Amino acid sequence: AVSEGLEYAEKHDDGVYCLGSVLNHVLLHQSIIGLETIKQFEIADDSPDLIVGCLGGGSNFGGIALPFVGEVLQKKRQCEFLASQSQAAPNLVKGEYRYDFGDVAEHTPLLKMYTLGHKTDMVPIRADGLRYHAAAPLISALRHHNIVKAVSYPADEKAIFEAAKIFLQTEGWLIAPESSYAVRAGIDEALKAEKAGQEKVICMNISGHGFLDLVAYKEKLEV
């Protein structure tokens, strides 16, 4: 869709294309999420030990994580960061840190990021928003410096939708498949902490509702 959008803009003199992920300025706009989350924790008189978000291109994860990262780099707080991905597009887990294009038609500038290669074929998944070959330069740099960690889950997404089911039953929210990756990783990290006898405050970013994903829920949960 990136290539098609850019091609459309190029053919129209008054056309402008705004990329919705990957580029650093997009993450800057999204950072309102993390800024609000910091305020919410202040109101609750609490602080997260771990920030978890799903990651495809990086706008969602960057939005929640970057304001906290800034405070970590300034030594104002201690916090860890975990990006949850699909094994269909594990750019932070298996990608190479190098310059690459942001789209298959090579219209974008070359960006230094963790990439699987802009020509890579990726299997279809229900969390289609995570099916992207590279991670945003800012997130990639943080990963390169071991500030951000990443985990990936099987492309059959069974574990993902099981986590979504648990979240629906306990919290009453039907969340998007992409958000369910954050919940899956959050649950797994909570179980690890429990096994180790640790108390840990885990912040999971819920990026959208799943009202348009009922077919996916029915398919994956066999209901």
Image (cartoon, rainbow, N blue to C red):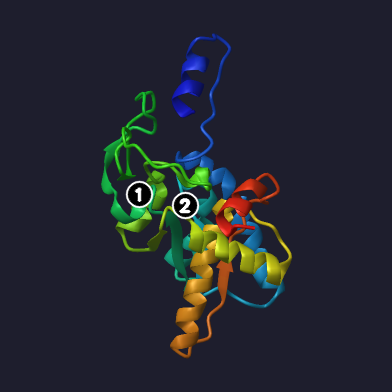
Q: Quadrant of the C terminus?
A: bottom right
**Residue named by callout 2:** 55
Residue assigned mark 1 = 91
In the rendered image, residue 161, in percent from the top left (x then y), is placed at 56, 60
Looking at marks 2 and 1 on the same chain, the residue that comes earlier in the sequence is marked by 2
Outermost residue on the bottom side: it is 197
* x then y, percent, for residue 38: 62, 65
Residue 151 appears in the rendering: yes
| Along the line of sight, the residue nearer the viewer: 83 or 46 | 83
Element marked by disc 2:
loop
Circles 2 and 1: CB atoms closer than 8 Å: yes
Q: Is residue 86 above or below residue 69?
A: above
For the residue marked with disc 1, what is the amino acid?
Asn
Q: Residue at x 53, y 45 (%)?
A: 28
> Are there few (<14), some (14-19), or many (20+) residues within 10 Å of tag 2?
many
Callout 1: helix, strand or loop? helix
Q: Is residue 114 left or right of residue 215?
A: left
Instruction: Name the side, left or right, on which 43 lies relative to 70.
Output: right
